[in-house]
Image: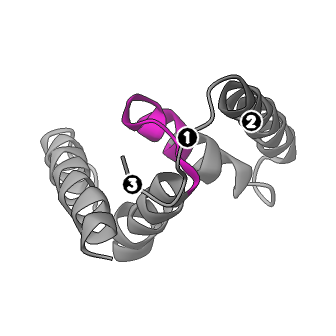
Amino acid sequence: MEAWTTAITGPTIEFLVARLKRMIADGEDARCTPDIALPVTYKSISTIIGVPQQDFAHFVALGETAQSAPRDFAAALAAIAELDAYFYEQLAERRRHPRNDCSPS
């Protein structure tokens, strides 16, 4: 469990601090749910399912867009399709190069 905590907590804090600094520098308002709670959720899920760190920001953006269905249904559908394709690609990669999914490495 400690390995998961280290793998999730440190990178999440780094990501959120950098994101909030960019938002503040750009004059944006930071809000708890979309700017802190959801990214923590995304980071936890993405780490557990094995999304590579370099794909994390894109994973978050797609997740946020996918949740925008009431505001922009077409964009949400496109994001869902891209997430679907991404996960099929990750699955194929895992089949080509199996690894221990019980480890956060």
Residue at image location 70% in from the left, 22% down from the top? 96
Of the numbered discs 3 and 1, the one sitting upstream in the chain is 1
Please rate how many residues cluster around mark 2, counting C-alpha atoms within 10 Å: few if below 14, some from 14 to 19, many from 20.
Answer: few
Q: Magenta segment range?
A: 49-60
Element marked by disc 3: loop
Residue 76: % across, % down: 78, 45
The image's mark for residue 63 is none
**In the rendered structure, are the residues bearing label 1 and label 2 in contact, judged by CB atoms less than 8 Å apart?**
no
Please rate how many residues cluster around mark 1, counting C-alpha atoms within 10 Å: few if below 14, some from 14 to 19, many from 20.
Answer: few
Between 2 and 26, the one nearer to me in the picture: 2
Element marked by disc 2: helix
Amino acid marked by disc 3 = Pro
Amino acid marked by disc 1 = Arg
Please rate how many residues cluster around mark 3, counting C-alpha atoms within 10 Å: few if below 14, some from 14 to 19, many from 20.
Answer: some
Label 1 – label 2 distance at C-alpha? 11 Å
Task: Work out whether 72 lies above or below 103.
Answer: above
Label 3 – label 1 distance at C-alpha? 11 Å
Q: Nearer the viewer, mark 1 or mark 2?
A: 1
Residue 32: % across, % down: 34, 75
Label 2 – label 3 distance at C-alpha? 17 Å
In the image, is residue 50 part of the stretch drawn in magenta? yes
Would residue 99 appear left or right of 104 to someone viewing this image?
right
Residue corresponding to mark 3: 104
Of the numbered discs 2 and 3, the one sitting upstream in the chain is 2
Residue at image location 15% in from the left, 54% down from the top? 17
Residue corresponding to mark 1: 99
Of the numbered discs 1 and 2, the one sitting upstream in the chain is 2
Amino acid marked by disc 2 = Leu
The image's mark for residue 91 is 2
Task: Work out whether 21 lies above or below 10.
Answer: above
In terms of secondary structure, what is the magenta stretch mainly? helix
Would residue 1 appear left or right of 49 to someone viewing this image?
left
